[in-house]
Image: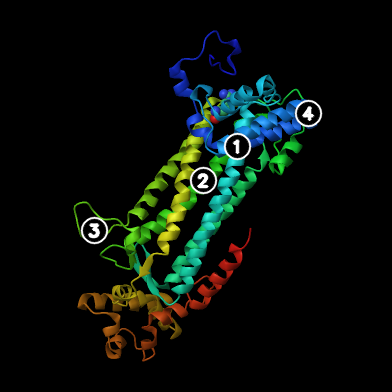
Amino acid sequence: MKKKKLWGGRFKSNTSDLLDDFTESISFDKRLAIYDIKASIAHILMLKKQKIINELDSEKIIKGLSKILNLVQKNKFHFDKFYEDVHLNIENYLIHTVGNIGKKLHTARSRNDQIAVDMMLYMKDEINDIIKLIKNLQKTIIQLAEKNIKIIIPSYTHLKQAQPILISHYLMAYFFKLQRDVEKFKSNLNSVDILPLGVGAGVGVNYPTDRKYIAKLLGFSKVSENSIDTVSQRDYIIEFIFAASMVSMHLSRLSEDLIIWNTDEFKFIEIDDAFTTGSSIMPNKKNPDILELIRGRTAKIYGNLMGMLTLLKGLPSSYNRDLQEDKKMLFETIDYIKPMLIIMNELLQNITFLEQNIMEKMKTGFIMAVDIADYLVKKNIPFREAHNIVGKIVKFCTEKNKTFFELGLKQLKKFSKKIDNEIVKIFDYRYSIESKVSEGGTSTANVKKEIAYAKKIIERV
Ligand code: ARG
């Protein structure tokens, strides 16, 4: 049997192979098949309820569609490039199996509203999956923060040692970054909760349809308000890729810290062999490739965000085939971000903090400088002056190649008469940490508070 395009009526001849190759989307939009069929079944049920098609026809069509659903689920459905996209592949097969009645399926709808509903249904599942993956990562972070609550590391600004912190405080910073990502994806869920199906090609349809009914059947809480906006907007995809860009940016920054901590120069962490790679030439190498690829793939996700924004920026209203390009950008983003979240979660569980090395790296004690200045403030020296005094001590130590801890009281007193024996107490990282009494600081009490709060909000749906 000669194949014919379902829209071929006004054409004298079939399309060229070149065109078929160039315009097809089935090679990638086939992943929407299940959603396309579910939306079609809901559409038919609505047409039946509204008496737009009769009961017998609708039953036959639904039976046919269910058969196709089964084939798709078993991976046995043959997708054909000739039929362009997921919609026409399924419709064509339906007509092929149930006969002419199948041709009624496309009453009161267009591929323009169909693709939007498929994408939204698909995205709902993917967004929920991604939220779960982020939450799993957050749970790991909480566990690590609890387990390592005693470990002290330097905090950094400008990648120079700043002040002592609990490693748990550092880790919890990522919990809160990820929490904002969860909120973004949740907001994205609202954007894909508005039914686009039923607006036809972009102006509405000539039938007394009941869109609210389809919405109910498919689990949408609202129906879109404006047909032109409905077929032309892809805000929900841009929002998604933006949220993915943000979470990947967070993962990338975490990766960067871990890469630095894993260097031979830092040696703050050891990554388990199972999560590192070797070099084909240098037998000595044990590389953090996973982290580098997380950083690298973040660039591709940003590329997709720019791609989507650019795709839409000069587009005339309402539907244009350019919009087909949204799929590759969305799918690639999803295919990148999910494994990134999964592997970061695993990797974090396979890291050991090398406490002794960390301590060794803080040995000059200069990291205590602010605490010493604050000690002088307590002795009634104005902060700016105290800052200056401690600066001079640091300068002295640097020139004499000494650490803070090596200076005796006599020497220290030369910088300020107000310095007394009490200063010994300040020369202690733990003291520094527990002195951070302000809300949100690195004291153990505050970090425990953070953890308790985190445990509470992670249970929120
Ligand atoms: N494959 C198309 C897409 O992804 C489906 C909609 C096509 N609509 C049209 N009028 N050609 O956007």
Which residue is rendered at x = 46% and y = 44% of the image? 335
Residue that numbered label 1 is attached to: 70
Percent coordinates x, y for residue 298 in the rendering: 42, 48
Is residue 130 something that shows in the picture? yes
**Element type where label 2 sits in the image:** helix
Mark 1 residue CB less than 8 A from any atom of ligand 1:
no
Which quadrant holds residue 415?
bottom left
Percent coordinates x, y for residue 33 in the rendering: 57, 35
Disc 3 residue crowd, few under 14, some 14–19, many 20+, Cα 10 Å? few
Please identify, in this view, whether the residue under mark 2 or under mark 3 is nearer the observer: 3
Q: CA distance from mark 1 to mark 2?
A: 35 Å
Q: Are marks 1 and 4 in contact (CB under 8 Å)?
A: no
Q: Quadrant of the C terminus?
A: bottom right
Q: CA distance from mark 3 to mark 1?
A: 50 Å
Number of numbered discs = 4
Please identify, in this view, whether the residue under mark 2 or under mark 4 is nearer the observer: 4
| Front residue (pair 299, 292) | 292
**Element type where label 3 sits in the image:** loop
Q: On the picture, is 48 further left or further right than 241?
A: right
> Please, is residue 300 above or below residue 65 in the view?
below
Q: On the picture, is 222 further left or further right than 422?
A: right
Please identify, in this view, whether the residue under mark 1 or under mark 4 is nearer the observer: 1
* Mark positioned earlier in the residue sequence (2 or 3): 2
* Mark positioned earlier in the residue sequence (4 or 3): 4
Residue 285, which numbered label? 3
* Mark positioned earlier in the residue sequence (1 or 4): 4
Say what amino acid the circle numbered 3 marks: Lys
Q: Quadrant of the N terminus?
A: top right
